[in-house]
């Protein structure tokens, strides 16, 4: 069985985020990266963690303890 991956915020561990379309000119250029905004804590970055869905809770606990 193939594992499903989800993106999660590296600051709070939330899997709820949106794509930041604040700078549409960046989308005109090939290779431009999107920014993501966490819906829970507001953290903004080009890269969020991508983890196996079954590991989300374990990784959230590590984030809360400051291990990640």
Image (cartoon, rainbow, N blue to C red):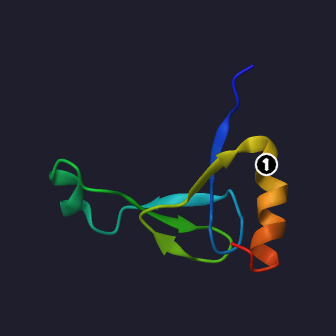
In which quadrant will I find the C terminus? bottom right
Exactly how many numbered labels are in the figure? Answer: 1
Picture coordinates of residue 61, whole percent (x, y): 84, 67
Front residue of 63/17: it is 63
- The answer to which quarter of the image holds residue 11 is bottom right
Q: Nearer the viewer, residue 55 or 16?
A: 55
As drawn, the residue found furthest toward the left would be: 29
In the rendered view, would you say 66 is above or below 19?
below
Where does the image place residue 33, in percent across and percent down from the top left?
32, 57
Please rate how many residues cluster around mark 1, counting C-alpha atoms within 10 Å: few if below 14, some from 14 to 19, many from 20.
few
Residue at image coords 75%, 72%: 63
Q: Residue furthest front?
A: 67
Among the 4 quarters of the image, the one containing residue 25? bottom left
Relative to 41, say whether 14 is above or below.
Answer: above
- At a point 34% along the width and 69% down the height, the residue shown is 22
Q: Where is residue 46? Give x, y as percent.
A: 41, 64
Q: Nearer the viewer, residue 64 or 18?
A: 64
Residue picked out by circle 1: 55
**Image side of residue 54 versus residue 43, left or right:** right
Q: Position of residue 64 (x, y in %)?
A: 80, 76
Q: Quadrant of residue 59?
A: bottom right
Instruction: Give the SS element for disc 1.
Output: helix
Tell which of 16 and 31 is nearer to you: 31
Image quadrant where one finds the N terminus: top right
């Amino acid at each position: 069985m193939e594992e499903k991956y989800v993106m999660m915020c590296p600051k709070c561990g939330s899997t709820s985020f949106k794509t930041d379309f604040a700078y549409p000119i960046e989308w005109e250029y090939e290779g431009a990266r999107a920014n993501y905004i966490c819906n829970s804590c507001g953290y903004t970055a080009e890269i969020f963690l991508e983890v196996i869905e079954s590991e989300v809770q374990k990784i959230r606990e590590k984030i809360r303890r400051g291990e990640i």
